Amino acid sequence: MSKPSYISIETLYKVLFLIGIFFSFCFGIWHFAIPWMFKWFMYIDPQYVSLINSIRWINILFSVFLTGIAADLFFNRRKIDKSNHFSVSAYVLLIIIWFVRMLVTIIYPFTGSYDWIFWVMIGIFSSIFVMILIPFIRIITLK
């Protein structure tokens, strides 16, 4: 009789980290297109150039920020430990981004109500948050 094979806990941490980072990166890339996908600017009078550009800037900077942090953590994943303060800081920042994203979604639902879109969004955001939080807790508790 063969012994059942189990996934090691370390492998599980790595998989959770990689999936969380992958989704963070993809959300960052996708966010570049959101204003055009949802035609954000058709609801704003074109004479308000500074408002339109402010929205563009915030979205572009958020997209670069999320994509950049996720890419940095992916490429430096073997160097992440509690003695590497830069990688820990970047990791904490990504955790904070997803936590705040959950809070903002709860306080200001996308459609203005707690409908099915709200539940899908909060489910996705909290899943990504947990996927990156669990490996982080493991990293900071290792000796």
Image (tube, grey):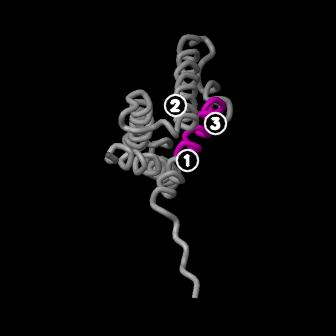
SS for dot 2: helix
What's drawn in magenta, residue-wise? 20-34
SS for dot 1: helix
Residue at image mark 2: 69
SS for dot 3: helix
Q: Residue visible at 52% across and 26% down?
A: 65
> Camera-side residue: 104 or 44?
104
| Residue lying furthest bottom | 1
> Camera-side residue: 30 or 93?
93
Circle number at residue 18: 1
Q: In this view, does 17 lie to the left or right of 136?
A: right
Camera-side mark, 2 or 3:
2
Among the two numbered marks 3 and 1 on one chain, the one whose residue lies closer to the N terminus: 1
Q: Please state the horizontal and vertical placement of residue 13, each as a whole percent of the image.
A: 47, 53
Q: Residue visible at 40% across and 31% down?
A: 84
Circle number at residue 30: 3
Q: Please state the horizontal and vertical placement of residue 2, each as a whole percent of the image.
A: 58, 83
Q: Which kind of residue does numbered mark 3 sit on?
A: Trp
Camera-side mark, 3 or 1:
1
Assess disc 1: are there few (<14), some (14-19) or many (≥20) residues with their C-alpha within 10 Å of its C-alpha.
some
